[in-house]
Amino acid sequence: MITRRKMLFSSAAALLTGGFSMLLGRSQPEAVDTQTTQPSPIKPSTNGLSYIPVVTPNGSTLPWEWDNGVKVFHLIAEPVKREFASGMTVNCWGYNGQTPGPTIEAVEGDRVRILVTNKLAEHTSIHWHGVLLPNGMDGVGGLTQKQIKPGETYAYEFTLRQHGTQMYHPHADEMLQMAMGMEGFFIIHPKEPERTRVDRDFCIFLQEWFIEPGTSTPNPAIMTDFNIFTFNSRAFPGTAPLVARLGDRVRIRIANLSMDSHPIHLHGYSFTITGTDGGPISPSAQWPETSVNVPPGTTRDIEFMANAPGDWAFHCHKNHHVMNAMSHDIPNMLGVKQKGVEQKVQNLLPDYMAMGESGMSEMATMKMPLPRNTLPMMTGEGPFGPLEMGGMFTVLKVREDITTYDDPGWYQPPKGTVAWLVTD
Amino acid sequence: MITRRKMLFSSAAALLTGGFSMLLGRSQPEAVDTQTTQPSPIKPSTNGLSYIPVVTPNGSTLPWEWDNGVKVFHLIAEPVKREFASGMTVNCWGYNGQTPGPTIEAVEGDRVRILVTNKLAEHTSIHWHGVLLPNGMDGVGGLTQKQIKPGETYAYEFTLRQHGTQMYHPHADEMLQMAMGMEGFFIIHPKEPERTRVDRDFCIFLQEWFIEPGTSTPNPAIMTDFNIFTFNSRAFPGTAPLVARLGDRVRIRIANLSMDSHPIHLHGYSFTITGTDGGPISPSAQWPETSVNVPPGTTRDIEFMANAPGDWAFHCHKNHHVMNAMSHDIPNMLGVKQKGVEQKVQNLLPDYMAMGESGMSEMATMKMPLPRNTLPMMTGEGPFGPLEMGGMFTVLKVREDITTYDDPGWYQPPKGTVAWLVTD
Amino acid sequence: MITRRKMLFSSAAALLTGGFSMLLGRSQPEAVDTQTTQPSPIKPSTNGLSYIPVVTPNGSTLPWEWDNGVKVFHLIAEPVKREFASGMTVNCWGYNGQTPGPTIEAVEGDRVRILVTNKLAEHTSIHWHGVLLPNGMDGVGGLTQKQIKPGETYAYEFTLRQHGTQMYHPHADEMLQMAMGMEGFFIIHPKEPERTRVDRDFCIFLQEWFIEPGTSTPNPAIMTDFNIFTFNSRAFPGTAPLVARLGDRVRIRIANLSMDSHPIHLHGYSFTITGTDGGPISPSAQWPETSVNVPPGTTRDIEFMANAPGDWAFHCHKNHHVMNAMSHDIPNMLGVKQKGVEQKVQNLLPDYMAMGESGMSEMATMKMPLPRNTLPMMTGEGPFGPLEMGGMFTVLKVREDITTYDDPGWYQPPKGTVAWLVTD
């Protein structure tokens, strides 16, 4: 266990080995409410920053402090209890009480030092995915450094020679630690202002989990049969909306450390893919898309002008990935007349409920008895009724008359612009 | 149930709410033979159209009629019996008796009205995937409109502000309804003629299904272990060939609403990826490929000059996706001497057949006893013997001397251009 | 069985049918050590070649000989015993004693003849994936030629009209034969020297297998639940390192005929995707990446300047693909206190070992009793301890002072460039 006294000792050790003076205790990030979006005024106070900071919905940005020209960050690897949505809390692993870990933001040219304290019960390390750095800072346990044992703090230090959307994650017991939620964004802003100013800049981390209904701990041995799919370790309806003002230029940065590619679809817009974890894509090479396919181990930046007001669905287009806790080996009752059968089975299995013979939408409204700590498969309530969604789903809300980026509620479409019932 | 009388009432209602005069009854599409390709003369009568219409192999294009400057289409969501190939008919859901639903074709700048009648036993909606439109026309049940209840007809109306290869599909009980076959193309032709005229323009919709051998209804709860893979809801050898004339410029538009990416491979050609559901890819950004990977929730346009005559295989390159009704948990008999064992097992299980000890090709020729309504795993007959294929497979037939685009039969290669046996 | 006498007869037959004079017996490739990389001097003797030959780690290049202006190659389809890594040998199928088969290298404009002898117990054929050729040489059994029966030799002959990274593989009992390891590179070098000279040019073939622990034969019926993942049919730590000299321009060509996309990640670099099996990507269309997603049925070329010295991990970023023989349905013991339980279970099942309650890294060091012919899940030893990797993993070793491309051992980072322990 790391005590404050130990930390200060570490600081002294840092002084000796690295020649830096700093108060390590102060670099401990403040506790954050990991379940809600940070408040979002239209003109954020940049506190003298040269860049417009990113927004990590349902997450936060990692504080840092100067130490003789070096930006010092502190990540603490540790178990994290994460509420995926109201009614479901999961035993994850992460950083600084969060999964994904807090977003690191820095600027091309910065010298950064990142302290990593291991509060897990097994060793770990951090790989700075996509960041150009000296080999010894690459964070591959066994290959470029010793593993960080429980209780130890390691320091990484390097100068940022690029800009773009990078990641951090363990390279030690890698399969298990990433599957438990250990991952975060490493955003490097350009030194020179970007040609096209971006007004809203979101970060969304994709992950998938298998959590047996009725339990609270992900099973990291699962390779394909996942049942919970998350944006920033939240499942719909636990995902914060993305709010933009009409006319904003919006960037969404998406990272994926799950086992599957996720084609993330935005309604109402054609956007452009502008970057990867390898850096910006030159304008001549950019593709237009409405669904950006994000393979594991990559990031994708997309950009668009928010010129269409409304509530636009934003979700993975693999249809099982917008469901919660779906079981994939249930008997197929579609078209099977079940009258009477269900009652007979319930005499034997009190919790039994057959899948609807006419489809599954009835399940979105009926009160199904659910195991503890389990979200309904199809859930969420919109202005026109049940949304029948889950997992990797949220809503981009584009509004004309807003003064903050807080959730503006549901869109009120102008008269005559809504699909209408023509039958009597 | 929608009766004609109700429909006329609806028409009156439409008049009142939307101010349009039309005879709704007449917009009902004609019954089509959904199993065969439409006949294909070299110079199709464009009936005054400004564009060369697309061809939907094993499918059709949705008729429409003018109503005061508005093109009016009518889609009817309903259960559909679909023959996947001779010997296998599946209880799907679709539109107007078809899966995929009939292809919608319109022109950039058109004002379109699309009536959607729900003849399913549960509610539905239609999302116009990739189409730029007012938020209230986006078709997300609960979010942008009320669900369309059984028996109801809804109208969507918007002006087309783009061109490209878009889709339509439900956004209500989405996972199940798409898995049952509810999907279709929405092709928007450019207002200005394309720089490079395309002579042949095909549309192919990808889908995957789990249909327990011996049964007829897809199990929509399956997430990964599919066993039937289709082009336009047909499995090889039920898939129509793609016929082109030597020297034609050919476009193939591919859409995917299944759970997996499908890398669609064309033999004999290097083609170019020219568009997505986000719109045309600028020439500077286009990639050459022989296999185009189509992620779920996307479309891809590919183009090439048909300058090599022959019968060129066109198929998904995931090797299990060119098999039918393959079981994935059979014991591995490869290299196991089975003489005598098979007979002993058959005494107990009369239908038992072991997988060949030397491979599986023997299965393509032997007469296996199959469960009812089940296609052989490896099937199809070519000019040189069994093709040993299934699922997402068809043949591009490029010919010099043809006067129609009807199936020209097998290619006759010039002497000396075929691989030859050199052993005695 | 093909005897030498038969082969000479075949040669005579070739003379009669094709008009070529050659001694078929001499075209038989020499036996190669398939488990080790070929030795690699910095300046390879090109033996008068117009190109720098590719390196196939853990593989080899196919010899050929001239016959009246035709380059003649000979592939023998046959069962192959392949050591995946020390301690695991697998009953595969391949060509000339190897899986992947030996790499074919030729030059744009070459006329090539490839003899294919079938020493399998079932028929086969070879499709030249991505190669532009006459339809009758396309190698699709049943469609463009008769199948090659056991014991037969077929000849393919065509002129190369392109350059790039193509493949060869069977198109007969395709699913099974590819799953058993039948695949190889077909590299066509450009006629005109490339604008940017490449100093090191590697070829890596991706494949995945299901080999029940304790057995030696892949189960080709498996569609999704694979447990061994290979680079050139070798699993880490059996994979050879990729060695480059500081300042070299490096190309890595990656091919995939497995069932899944593999995002291959390189540490320490941003590289460029420069080609596919469809040909070179024009510079204006190239994307920067740190992980190149390689879908099934495609190849990808990546290029970068080796300007950062060190040992850089190179691996698939699907985290289960850097594990060996992982079981995916084990009970989840994470966080479960197991003291005493393990002993009790071992009284019943002597081999039982519970998954660690604190993670899996303990497994990388403890001596687990493994079934025969089975690799540890997490293995490999680096300069700083256990690497905890497996499967699709190797190391790019970039060095300043080397005179050969043989394995230079581990990197010695300059003082002060390694992450350091700051706790006492």
Image (cartoon, coloured by chain):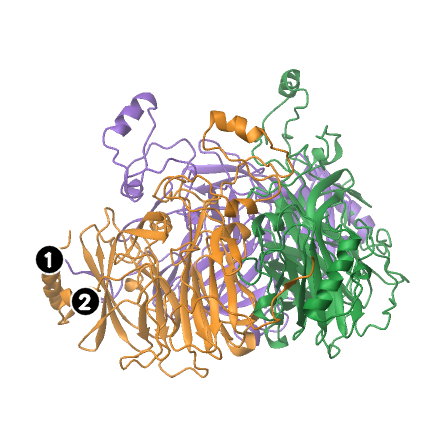
Chain colours: A purple, B orange, C green
User: Toward the viewer: A210 or B282?
Assistant: B282
Q: Residue B210 at what x, y percent from top left?
A: 42, 44
User: Toward the viewer: B219 or B392?
Assistant: B392
Quadrant in which residue B100 is drawn: bottom left
Q: Count of labels shown?
A: 2
User: What is the quadrant of the N terminus of chain A in the image?
Assistant: top right
Q: Residue C77 at what x, y percent from top left?
A: 69, 52
Q: Residue C84 at what x, y percent from top left?
A: 73, 44
**B134 left or right of C362?**
left
User: Toward the viewer: C244 or A245?
Assistant: C244
Say above or below: A59 vs C337: below
Does residue B280 appear in this view?
A: no
Q: Which residue position is annotated with label 1?
A: B6
Say above or below: C249 vs C393: below
> What is the secondary structure assignment of the residue under circle 2?
helix
Q: Which mark is residue B27?
A: 2
Say above or below: C367 vs A298: above
Amino acid on which disc 1 is placed: Lys
